[in-house]
Image (cartoon, helix red, strand yellow):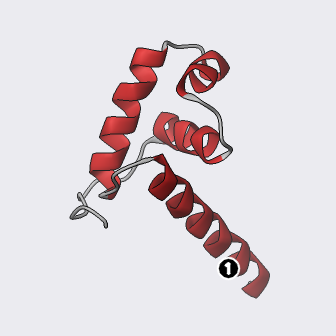
Amino acid sequence: MFRSRGNSTPNDREHRVIELVAQGLKNKEVADEIGTTEHVIKNYLRAIYDKLGLWNRVELALWYEARRHEGLVMAQVQ
């Protein structure tokens, strides 16, 4: 299901793309939101998938939600 994980983490711009994709926005909508082109968003997604060892936007959304939930749980523990 998952690719072997890369050893990089997403940068700030990639995190924003991940957040918007996880909200259900289409590539064109993400591009409009951050002020770039759909082609650039596709390139970002390829890089993100490689960095995280994922195959598609569904896996990306699940990855994002799991990390978001971890952050909420950690905030409640502290």
Residue 47 x, y percent position in the rendering: 31, 39
**In the image, 8: left or right of 33?**
left
**In the image, 3: left or right of 23?**
left
Query: From this viewpoint, which residue is outermost toward the right?
Result: 76
Residue under the image location 71 percent in, 79 percent down: 73
- Residue at label 1? 74
Residue 22 x, y percent position in the rendering: 61, 48
Residue sitting nearer the eye, 73 or 57: 57
Q: Quadrant of the C terminus?
A: bottom right
Residue under the image location 59 percent in, 14 percent down: 35
Residue sitting nearer the eye, 40 or 12: 40
Residue 7 x, y percent position in the rendering: 24, 59
Residue sitting nearer the eye, 17 or 42: 42
Q: Quadrant of residue 44?
A: top left
Residue under the image location 34 percent in, 27 percent down: 43
Residue under the image location 58 percent in, 38 percent down: 16
**In the image, 54: left or right of 61?**
left
Dot 1, crowdedness within 10 Å: few (<14), some or many (≥20)? few
1 vs 78: above or below: above
Marks counted in the figure total: 1
Tag 1: residue type? Met
40 vs 3: above or below: above
